Amino acid sequence: MAHCTPPPPQHGKVGGAGAGGDSWRRCRRSPLREMARSRRVKWLNHYSSAQTILIVGDGDFSFSLALATAFGSGENLVATSLDSYEVLAHKYTKAQSNAMELKRMGAKVLHGISAKSMMRHSYLETRRFHRIVFNFPHAGFNGKEYEMHVVILHRELVKGFFGNARELLLPDGEIHISHKT
């Protein structure tokens, strides 16, 4: 419906309801608005089922699965993890089942995605998102959290994430990042 042409005038009328004017206006709606009208948009806090959402570094994919479950679909979600599928299966008991359920619900699940270089990933480089979410960014366990070299690693991770996320964001999109404190 994105590229419709106006209906021809009928019996000397131009653009009125009898000439299909209403259907012409309906035809000009944006794809996102059409999707919202064709099915009920569901919300979970800051996120809606009509938004394209990239979830970065989701560990066991529990956050992504919670969104997909609340929406009744994962078709607008891309869930990523830094670890490979095999490593996740050893780290988290529910990672495999959560990833499989996300895929079943229509979500795209990607492994081995670094927050500092994700914009160059072959699947992500051509996509743009309404929301990009990074919950509890962590650069790994390389010492005590208060040691300066660990603080610098965390800062570099967040800086790299923001630099990549802005390239994958739609003009009216938002980046959401959460921290435990």
Image: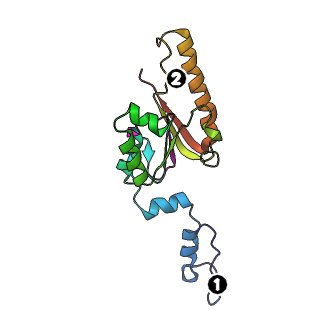
Q: Is residue 22 left or right of residue 120?
A: left
- Against 126, is 118 above or below? above
Tell me the element at label 2.
loop
- Residues drawn in magenta: 50-62
Confirm whether residue 59 shows in the render.
no
Would you say residue 148 sits in the magenta stretch?
A: no
Q: Nearer the viewer, mark 1 or mark 2?
A: 2
Magenta residue check for 52:
yes
Mark 2 closeness class: few <14, some 14–19, many ≥20 residues within 10 Å: some
Percent x, y of residue 22: 54, 74
Q: Nearer the viewer, residue 100 or 86?
A: 86
Q: Kindly tell me whether residue 77 is visible in this rendering.
A: yes
**What is the CA distance from the residue labelled 1 to the residue labelled 2?**
64 Å
Seen in the picture, residue 158 relative to 29 is either above or below; the reply is above
Residue placed under numbered mark 2 in the picture: 139
Residue 96 lies in quadrant: top left
Reading the image, the residue beneath label 1 is: 9
Quarter containing the C terminus: top left
Which residue is the extreme one toward the top?
147
Give the percent coordinates (x, y) of residue 24. 58, 73
